[in-house]
Amino acid sequence: MTTETIGLFYMLSDAGPVVKSVMLLLLFFSITSWAIIFIKFRYIRKAFKESNDFTDMFWQSQNLSDAFSKAKGLRSSPAARIFIAAYMEMARSENKDKKNIQRKRTENSYFQIIGSIKRSLNRSIGVEIRRLVQLVPFLATAGNTAPFIGLFGTVWGIMGTFHEIGLSGSASLAVVAPGISEALIATAAGLAVAIPSVIAYNYFTDKIRALDSEWQSYSADLLNIIERDVQKQMEG
């Protein structure tokens, strides 16, 4: 343990209850933020990889039913779950339409099927995005509030220092320096929490936006394929 570390622990142990409470709160923010950073980094990286794996497999499939059979083995992939939801909605809509044998299939029923599939795609993408976004807003909260929490600890510590100066009647460096040092630690701790939190929040937001764009593009392509497939079936 270095002399600087020992000095830091000494200053913290000698700090007042308010500054200690501020430091404990910032420690909670720091531990929670880093836990979220590690969890979301792994989850988002996995989402990118598995989505790319599925889309590569999808474009190599012979037809939608072949892609569906392969997708069932890749349920951990967000893109696979989006496809499965759309395919099952297509199967439900077509079966419901076929049950009414008295009514001839019309252009109206075609648009109903496509509309329900489109809504299913939008719902599935929304669910996947919510999974990705979960816990990320805490990083923004930590980044925005930690500096002010640290600043509060600093102001309170400086107020205590001035109070001690008034009681001792001396404004020498020996009297002022320890209290000021303790107070400034709170500001440094607040910045230490805020900086990585803000960086991680911006990084994750950018990656989630990229995945959303990728899934929206894929769903549009998938919907075009489904439209052609449904059109052929209805014509046949």
Image (cartoon, rainbow, N blue to C red):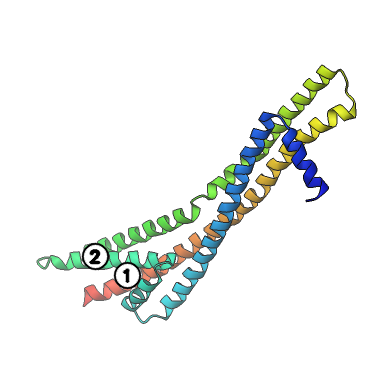
Q: Residue at x 88, y 23 (%)?
A: 171
Sequence-first tag of 1 and 2: 2
Give the class, few, some or many, for how many residues have Cα within 10 Å of label 1's Cα (few <14, many ≥20): some
Residue 188, how many percent across, how many down? 73, 41
Quarter of the image where one finds residue 14: top right
In the picture as drawn, the residue positioned furthest to the left comes out as 102
Which kind of residue does numbered mark 2 sit on?
Arg
Q: Which mark is residue 46?
A: none
Q: Which residue is mark 1?
A: 227
| Residue at left offset 53%, top offset 58% | 208
Quadrant location of residue 150? Answer: top right
In the image, residue 39 lies at what x, y percent? 54, 57
> What residue is at 84 percent from the left and 32 percent from the top?
177
Q: Is residue 124 left or right of residue 22?
A: left
Q: Quadrant of the C terminus?
A: bottom left
Residue matched to label 2: 92
* Residue 27 falls left or right of residue 83: right
Check disc 2: other Cα within 10 Å, few if <14, some if 14-19, many if 20+: some
Q: Residue furthest right?
A: 172
Q: Residue at x 55, y 46 (%)?
A: 138
Residue 113 shows up from this direction: yes
Is residue 16 shown left or right of residue 180?
left
Q: How many numbered marks, from 0 up?
A: 2
Q: Amino acid at mark 1?
A: Glu
Q: Nearer the viewer, residue 220 or 85?
A: 85
Q: In this orientation, does residue 148 appear?
A: no
